[in-house]
Image: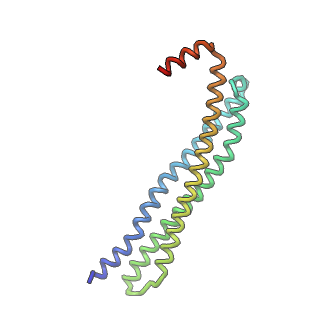
Amino acid sequence: MADPSLQVLTAMITPAVLISGAGTLLMSTSSRLGRVTDRVRQLTARFKVLVTEEGRQEGLAREEKRLIVKQLPRLARRSRIIVRAMTALYLAVAMLVLTSILIGGSALLGQDAGLLPVMIAIAGSGSLAYGALLLSFETRLSASTTREEMKFLVSLGEHYAGLYDEQLLRELGEKLNE
């Protein structure tokens, strides 16, 4: 027969595995929020350049301004999703820690905690799953924004390529294909 103290410790440690997973997600999610913030700052700085007299003379400046204006609501949406995911993940950590405390406290006091720790653990696991699901939505939104930006860069490249000698471009293309 196993030592009851070890059984309690084992039961208390089980939520720690999920807490560790939530912590890893929280770290990466915090980094994602930082990247969104940095991207908004970059776009703001670029937009400020594009609205100057000199910036308006750049090739495809109008299209780039439209792209920036179109991206801002998506970045705001990404930011909201990330904040919701972080809230869900922090809530999951709190519930899973509370589960461990209830298990340990009930054993220490010699009281049966009943289904309460199980219910809180299930709620914490559900919150963890919800946070992960939100992050998958945010990833898809990020990827669609990146694809849109790549399309613009291709058109920008085509614009500038058209400004150069077509013969030179063919020669360069042949060299790249060698």
Between 81 and 133, the one nearer to me in the picture: 133
Report the residue at 34% width, 75% height from top: 9
Please identify the quarter of the rendering in which residue 113 is found: bottom left
For the N terminus, give its image quadrant. bottom left
Q: Is residue 51 above or below residue 134?
A: above
Tell me: residue 33, above or below residue 85.
above
Which residue is at the front of the view, 107 or 58? 58
Relative image position of residue 52 (x, y in whole percent):
71, 27
Viewer-side residue, 174 vs 56: 174
Q: Residue at x 50, y 69 (%)?
A: 124
Give percent across and percent down for residue 74: 66, 47
Q: Residue at x 61, y 51 (%)?
A: 79
Q: Closer to the camera, 132 or 38?
A: 132
* In-image side of 81 versus 57 (left or right): left
The residue depicted at 72 percent of the width and 36 percent of the height is 66
How many numbered dots are placed on residues in this image?
0
Residue 99 falls in which quadrant of the image?
Answer: bottom left
Rendering coords of residue 153 (x, y %):
62, 31
- The image position of residue 178, as x and y in percent, is 47, 20
Q: Report the coloring of the rendering.
A: rainbow
In the drawing, does residue 57 fall left or right of residue 176?
Answer: right
When the figure is inspected, residue 54 is found, relative to residue 6, above or below; the finding is above
